[in-house]
Image (cartoon, coloured by chain):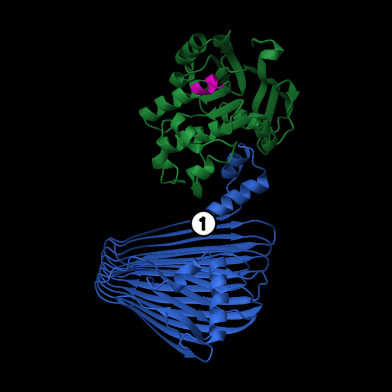
Amino acid sequence: MKNRKSNDKVLIKLEDIGYSAGEKEILSGVNLDIGRGEIVSVIGVNGTGKTTLAAILMGLNGYTPGKGKVLFDGKDITNLSTTERAKLGITLAWQIPASFEGVTVREYLSIGKNASPEKYLKMVGLNPALYLDRTVDDNLSGGERKRIELASVLSVEPKLVILDEPDSGIDMASINAIKRVIRDFKKIGASVILITHSETMARVGDRVALLCNGRIVKDGSVGEVTDFFRRHCEECDHIGKPDEGILK
Amino acid sequence: MKTDSGGENTEYKNEFKAIAEAYKKAGGDEKVLLDTGYGTLVINENKVLGKNEIDGLRIDSKSTENGVNVKVSVDDGTKIEKPVHLCFGMLPKEGKQVINSEFFIGKNAKVNFLAHCSFPNAEHIEHVMDSKVHVGENAEMSYKETHYHSENGGIHVHPTLRGKIERGGRLLEEFRLTKGSVGMLNIDYEIELDEKSSCDLLTKIYGKRDDNIEVRESLHLNGPYAAGTAKSRIVLVDNAFGNVLGEITGNAPHTRGHVDCHEIVQGEGAKAISTPKISVEHPLARVTHEAAIGRINKKELETLMARGLTEEKAIDFIVKGLLR
């Protein structure tokens, strides 16, 4: 794979990451660099290890890689906890955000640094007057909940944002708002790892990496990789077994 | 403001002051206890320290050997805008208090009760609250009860409620015990619902140390289109034990019921049991249940930790929300 940046421009670097769940190998030999302020889409069909990759980046319990290193700002963070990584500026938003019964949007957006929850709601296109006192639970629609999750991510003023399938299960208006927010992350200097199986969403990235059977098999320009994905992966006939012929 | 002593007894005044202070600690607004614009009832042990009736609201009380018999009536068509404040407590460390209460809410009436039960010095106290509730046709009643116990434990609380809601009536019943030590708590609610009536029961409890919590919430949807929910949120830490039975029977066409129990267990000594018991006796009735029991949801925890909270602070954040 291409190693495209000098070290001072790289924010996070995955070096030869391998991860297995029991006997099953989920990720193998994953190398990936994300530059400062860069949006990198990680694309792949279901079951290729995208969410596992997100969990390893965030340092979730049980997701320490069996092999390889995670470097952030040049420092080895492979064995740091989730909280320690968050304090460095790494954060994550799940495909289906968690529900927090009884917790108001105002409280949820006040976990991070000292800034106004109103500001972050406006950044994701939600009217603070209508949302601040609502609770972060099932009374919100899928699109509203996803936007509030992005507001929560913004509220911690991150350096690296990991977004797991931000477009799944929501309406078109919310998808457009989410795309805009992802571009806004770049404007505030944050890097984004955008995990998706949607070619359309992948196009928000500056660069796309294609994950297949736990390996990054393509890493290149948006046009090059999404074109490859459309031709070979949207109707994948070799799930779990990358076609070496096609990859060449 | 009337009291059983005529309002001039110094001992009663001092007790009133102390119970008002405990009421404040339990989350109540003690100023309203002296505001004649509100319906109020203040009881310490077996003494009625204060009582205020307003238009359409009648409060009859009679002291007994170890408690008070109370009858609260709201006249037909009366809509009481401000909440009626009920303050029950025991200031001594030891003793037994039995409150036998009856609530009659007239046709088309509407009333909200805020009840606070305070036992700030409890070491060996038994508090029995035996209530009967009758909600008339198209009437609305909410009864929100918050308990404040000392941290000493040693308190036994037995709230029992038997209710009947007439056609089109509505009852919201909430019980909260999230501050201080629960001790031994045995809640037993059973409500009968007529046609197009509804009832929502909500219980929130934080059990610690050796607290023993038993909750039974039972709804009988007897009339067509009757609806009800029995919801409980219980957090257990240390060696606390919680046992929740949520029971709904759908006995008539188009009745709808839902049992929703969530018990969080933190720590190896705590134990939780949840038993939803649902039944229907008509093909057009529908009753559902959901229960989550055990550790805090992993995804909730991970999300908060990914925002920079430690695991301990994340748990605290989740529990506070759940018990609010």
Q: Residue at x 53, y 10 (%)?
A: A221
Q: Residue at x 54, y 88 (%)?
A: B66
Indicate the quadrant where residue B53 lies. bottom left
Q: Is residue A225 visible?
A: yes
Q: Which chain is blue?
A: B
Between B9 and A150, the one nearer to me in the picture: B9
Provide residue A243's location: percent of width, then percent of height.
Answer: 56, 15
Indicate the quadrant where residue B6 lies. bottom left
Provide residue B308's location: percent of width, then percent of height.
Answer: 64, 38
The amino acid type of the residue labelled 1 equals Arg
> On screen, A241 above or below B238?
above
Q: Colour of chain A?
A: green
Q: Which residue is mark 1?
A: B324
Q: Residue at x 42, y 71 (%)?
A: B35
Q: Say what secondary structure mark 1 lies in.
A: loop
Provide residue B133's location: percent of width, then percent of height.
Answer: 37, 76
Magenta-colored stretch includes residue A186? yes
Magenta-colored stretch includes residue B94? no
> On screen, B73 above or below B139?
below
Residue B91 horizontal side relative to residue B193, left or right = right
Query: Which residue extends farthest bottom?
Result: B65
Q: Quadrant of the N terminus of chain B?
A: bottom left
Counting the numbered discs, the total is 1
> On screen, B133 above or below A118?
below
Between A12 and B57, the one nearer to me in the picture: B57
Q: Is residue A25 visible?
A: no
Residue B64 horizontal side relative to residue B155, left or right = left
> Which span is picked out in magenta?
A184-188
Q: Residues within 10 Å of mark 1 (few under 14, many from 20)?
A: few
Q: Residue at x 24, y 71 (%)?
A: B77
